[in-house]
């Protein structure tokens, strides 16, 4: 039994492996970019002649923007591309599990680790952009330098948790379906598949919101906190 | 008993214990969180959006403990390094 799609290898040349994770990631990327390219070729500004597809995309983007604003009120749209891409990629790859034979790339620890590393890099980058280099790294030394290892430990462990959570949820969904197919075919796997869709969407939401929460915690400088306290 | 039997028995037993005990704590925690969230939503229906968003994030945090246990159980059963070592020898 394959727990991750990493072990399904389609093509191999010396040390280069083309496994199912990479192939299905490419399919998701192709789908996302293809659909958005097709829809945004003729962007219509007037309200009356908008196409349905453009309306659908606008609803999605507007919702993501609203959620970001709720987490980080003073935040501008600079977080939208990163967090929105995370959400759309994870949601698409999870929701496509209704397609028979689909291996969700998020069901492999390598994909989720890559996404978590992206978040782990983006958090200090956004923090430094907002607060400046010295001010951001001074945050690690607050309230005193004894806290430095604990700050580092908490950043590492929360990124690890981000990766393992997504991987565990998606992998357990497909594993349960595979086991139930052997035990009680036909009806029960269908229910678990429906539950898996719900879990997949919730996990995509949680991943994006947690990334946004981490970024929001990094960009809130000490001045903002003190200003909020005194004013 | 040779070492293969010992490793097989102990890893399956450890996986069962890990999953069983490891799901008690998150279950209690999630129950408490949902109970509090429901009662506060009943008191303040206007804040339902904020409460449910925070609830989802908190549930994901609590849930991840159970997911760790699950991943460790899966590793013990399907990808046990000690078992692979013994089999390869």
Image: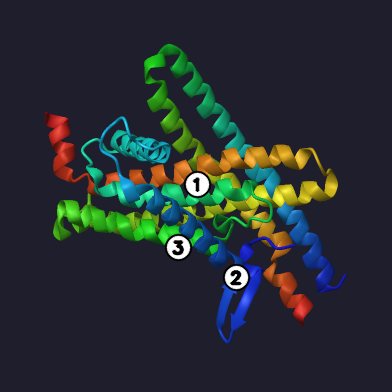
Reading the image, the residue beneath label 1 is A91
Reading the image, the residue beneath label 3 is A114
- In front: label 3 or label 2: 2
Of all residues, the one furthest to the top in this rendering is B43
Mark 2: secondary structure: strand
What chain is tagged by disc 2? A
Q: Residue at x 40, y 42 (%)?
A: A209
> Distance between the Cα atoms at labels 3 and 2?
16 Å
Look at the image and tell me whether residue A141 can be seen: no
Say which of A94 and A107 sits in front: A94
Question: Residue A214: image x %, image y %?
Answer: 34, 47
Q: Residue at x 84, y 46 (%)?
A: A183
Question: Residue A35: image x %, image y %?
Answer: 44, 51
Q: Earlier in the sequence, mark 3 or mark 2?
A: 2
- Specify the quadrant of the image occupied by residue A13: bottom right
Say which of A85 and A178 sits in front: A85
- Specify the quadrant of the image occupied by residue B28: top right
Q: Quadrant of the C terminus of chain A?
A: top left
> Distance between the Cα atoms at labels 2 and 1?
21 Å
With respect to residue A17, does A217 lie above or below? Answer: above
Q: Earlier in the sequence, mark 3 or mark 1?
A: 1
Task: For label 3, count other residues whose C-alpha is less than 10 Å away and answer few (under 14), some (14-19) or many (20+).
Answer: few
Of all residues, the one furthest to the front in this rendering is A49
Reading the image, the residue beneath label 2 is A19
Of all residues, the one furthest to the bottom in this rendering is A14
Question: Residue B33: image x %, image y %?
Answer: 51, 28
Q: Earlier in the sequence, mark 2 or mark 1?
A: 2
Do tag 3 and tag 2 residues touch (Cβ < 8 Å)?
Answer: no
Q: Specify the color scheme.
A: rainbow
Say which of A143 and A97 sits in front: A97
Q: Residue at x 84, y 68 (%)?
A: B5
Q: Would residue A203 be found to the left or right of residue A119 on screen?
A: right
């Amino acid at each position: 039994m394959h727990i991750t799609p990493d072990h399904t290898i389609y093509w191999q040349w010396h040390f280069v492996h083309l496994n199912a994770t990479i192939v299905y990631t490419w399919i998701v990327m192709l789908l996302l970019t293809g659909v958005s390219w097709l829809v945004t070729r003729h962007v219509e500004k007037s309200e009356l002649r908008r196409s349905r597809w453009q309306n659908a995309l606008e609803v999605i983007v507007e919702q993501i923007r609203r959620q970001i604003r709720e987490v980080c009120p003073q935040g501008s749209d600079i977080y939208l591309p990163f967090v929105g891409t995370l959400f759309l990629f994870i949601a698409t790859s999870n929701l496509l599990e209704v397609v028979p034979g689909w291996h969700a790339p998020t069901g492999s620890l390598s994909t989720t680790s890559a996404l978590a590393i992206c978040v782990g890099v983006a958090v200090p980058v956004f923090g430094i952009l907002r607060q400046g280099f010295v001010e951001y790294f001074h945050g690690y030394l607050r309230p005193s330098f004894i806290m430095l290892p604990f700050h580092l430990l908490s950043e590492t462990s929360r990124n690890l948790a981000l990766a393992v959570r997504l991987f565990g949820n998606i992998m357990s969904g497909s594993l349960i379906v595979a086991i139930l197919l052997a035990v009680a075919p036909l009806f029960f796997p269908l229910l678990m598949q429906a539950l898996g869709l719900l879990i997949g969407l919730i996990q995509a939401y949680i991943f994006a919101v947690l990334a946004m929460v981490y970024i929001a915690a990094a960009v809130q400088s000490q001045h903002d906190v003190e200003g909020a306290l005194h004013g | 008993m040779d070492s293969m039997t010992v490793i097989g028995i102990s890893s399956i037993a450890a996986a069962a214990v890990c999953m069983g005990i490891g799901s008690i704590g998150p279950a209690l925690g999630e129950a408490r969180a949902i109970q509090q969230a429901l009662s506060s939503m009943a008191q303040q229906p206007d804040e339902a959006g904020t409460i449910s968003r925070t609830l989802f994030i908190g549930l994901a945090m609590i849930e991840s403990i159970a997911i760790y246990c699950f991943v460790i159980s899966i590793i013990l059963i399907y990808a046990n390094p000690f078992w692979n070592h013994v089999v390869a020898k």
